[in-house]
Amino acid sequence: MAKILSFFDFQDSFPDEQACFDYLFKLRWPDGFKCPQCQHDQASFISTRKVFQLWSYRENQESKLIDPPGHCCTNCVKV
């Protein structure tokens, strides 16, 4: 079961957006980034859009940190 944080504990653990991003990234990809569909791990991070764009695709294939329900990774997986 997940530990319930108090408001102040949460603020201490996640003082800024980057801390939240780092935590969610490690939760989603504990061994480093991998596309959920094809398992490729070579991608460029586009910081202005917070997406990973896979090197293996010519068309615009991206991987986001959080997918909406029923989302197909062939389009994107945003951070």
Image (cartoon, rainbow, N blue to C red):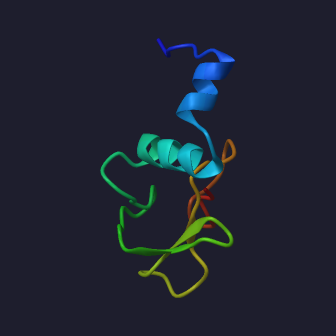
Q: Where, by quadrant of the figure, is residue 78 drawn? A: bottom right
Task: Tell whether 61 sits left or right of 70.
Answer: left
Residue located 63% across and 30% down the image: 11
Compare residues 32 and 8 and report the one nearer the observer. Answer: 8
Q: Position of residue 22 (x, y in %)?
A: 49, 49
Residue located 67% across and 73% down the image: 48
Compare residues 7 and 62 and report the one nearer the observer. Answer: 7
Task: Tell whether 29 sits left or right of 12.
Answer: left
Q: Where, by quadrant of the figure, is residue 7 drawn? A: top right
**How many discs appear?**
0
Residue located 61% across and 80% down the image: 60
Q: Where is residue 30 in the image (x, y as percent from the top left)?
A: 35, 45
Residue located 57% across and 74% down the image: 61
Compare residues 7 and 48 and report the one nearer the observer. Answer: 7
Depicted 19 relative to depicted 41: above or below: above
Depicted 33 relative to depicted 59: above or below: above
Depicted 5 relative to depicted 19: above or below: above
Task: Tell whether 56 sits left or right of 45.
Answer: left
Q: Which residue lies furthest to the left in this view?
A: 31
In the rendered image, the quadrant that contains the C terminus is bottom right
